[in-house]
Image (cartoon, rainbow, N blue to C red):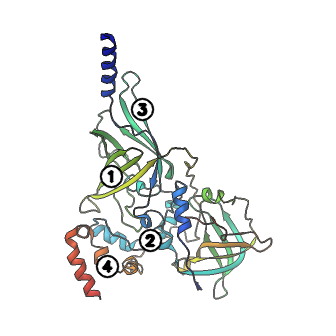
Amino acid sequence: MRASAGWLLLALGAGAANAQVNLVGEWSARVHEDFGDRVPGDVQGDFTGVPLNDAARRYAEAFDVTRVAVLEHQCQPYNVAHIYRGPLQFRLWEDKDPATQEIIAYRQYLGTYMQWRTIWMDGRTHPPDYAPHTFMGFSTGRWNGDILTVDTTHIKKEFYRRSGIPSSDETTLIEHYIRHGDLLSHVIIVTDPVYLTEPYVNSQEFVRMARGNQNWLYNCEYAMEVPKPKNEVPHYLSENPFIEEFAEKFGLPFPAVFGGAETLYPEYVPKLEALMNQSR
Amino acid sequence: MASNCKLAVPAILLALMAGAEARAHHSFTATYFEDQTIEIEGKLLQFMFRNPHTFVHVEAPDEHGQMQRWAVEWGGAGQLSSQGVTNQTLRVGDVVTITGNPGRDPADHRIRLQYLRRNSDGFDWGRRPGETFN
């Protein structure tokens, strides 16, 4: 009897020593929230919900969405601060130390643009500033209770929105992975001293795939989609005729769409109402 | 040009069901006038069956009768493959009639394809359930 109790305690103890939530599996995005922005895209001029600064405004004003058709940009991946917002499925697995069975790193493969990530869990530090930047950046992770928190630096510049809100190569990212059964909440907090006045926060939901599928490839091929003179870059440096199209479509005052951080808080509602009353 | 109103529901369903790797690298709504349609008829010059989106280049007259090289945007190769379209579906020299949304910059002569018909044999795409792309 005593021997059985000992084995039981040993088994329970072994479990307790490695009791993190298991995130391993294949996860598929649910994009009902913000669907219009995240999948088909809306008309030009949607800058809502982003604490953009004046530098970002000037960039966005001059941005022509057809720039992504330029040869050099057609297959450019979204960076790690943006890619989870789109339709996406990702596979997550663990690398374990064979001797100790401790997790050295989480690995991810993202179907969209066929991107690979490593989230180091072994306590290593981030590389120096001059180290190369990539679209997925350099990531380290830690557990806070049942939440996996990931810090990412060394991210290549890209966009926060397809409407032309830029991100810089000084972007850093904090992610929280929170599992609820077969649902995964993914919270992202983006900091960018070049284009944002305060952290930009979003969350996405994923569902664990009960069955695998073959939708994992994104073989992108460069081609002259729309014949244009070589080196021409679409832009609206002089005047953007579509900049207020989103505001007009949804009956919003343009300052509320282009206003950045102050428009994100409930305290802005009286100002919004005043602006809407003026426009009536 | 005629007004056109497409239901978004099939595209939404497809996106949700397919795991939706085919997110447009740009917003169609921002790139094209989705409340307008135009029709062109001409000779196929190039068929680029590819990701992120397939493009068909067609030589056809504009509204002034001037011949133009039109760039017609279609679905990604992965999405079209599931609908029976392959890189052999169209050939250079095919005469086709195409209906779609015009691009916002008229100088681009760009169209988002909604319906395509090959005149020689009546092959068509765009009017059966599921024949859509995002």
Rendering coords of residue A167 (x, y %): 35, 60
Camera-side residue: B94 or B121?
A: B121
Residue lying at 36% horizontally and 23% vertically, measured from the top left: A100
Chain letter for mark 4: A
| Badges 2 and 3, same chain | yes
Name the subunit of mark 2. Answer: A
Q: Is residue A62 left or right of residue A111?
A: left
Expressed as whole percent of the image width and height from the top left, the position of residue A56 reads 31, 67
Distance from label 2 to label 1 (Cα)?
23 Å
Residue A56 is tagged as: none
Q: Earlier in the sequence, mark 2 or mark 1?
A: 2
- Res. A95 mark: 3
Quarter residue A127 falls in: top left
Amino acid beneath label 3:
Asp
**Residue that mark 1 sits on:** A187
For disc 2, the marked residue is A42
Left or right for A224, reference A61: right
Residues at marks 3 and 1 touching, judged by CB atoms closer than 8 Å: no
| Label 2 or label 3, whichever comes before in sequence order | 2
Q: Distance of mark 4 from mark 1, alpha carbons? A: 28 Å
Contact check, label 2 and label 4, Cβ < 8 Å:
no
Contact, mark 2 vs mark 1 (Cβ under 8 Å): no
Q: Is B129 above or below relative to A169?
A: below
Cα–Cα span, label 3 and label 1: 23 Å
First-in-chain label (4 vs 3): 3
User: Which quadrant holds the N terminus of chain A?
Assistant: top left
The picture places residue A178, in percent across and down from the top left corner, at: 33, 46
Seen in the picture, residue B80 relative to B35 is either above or below; the reply is above
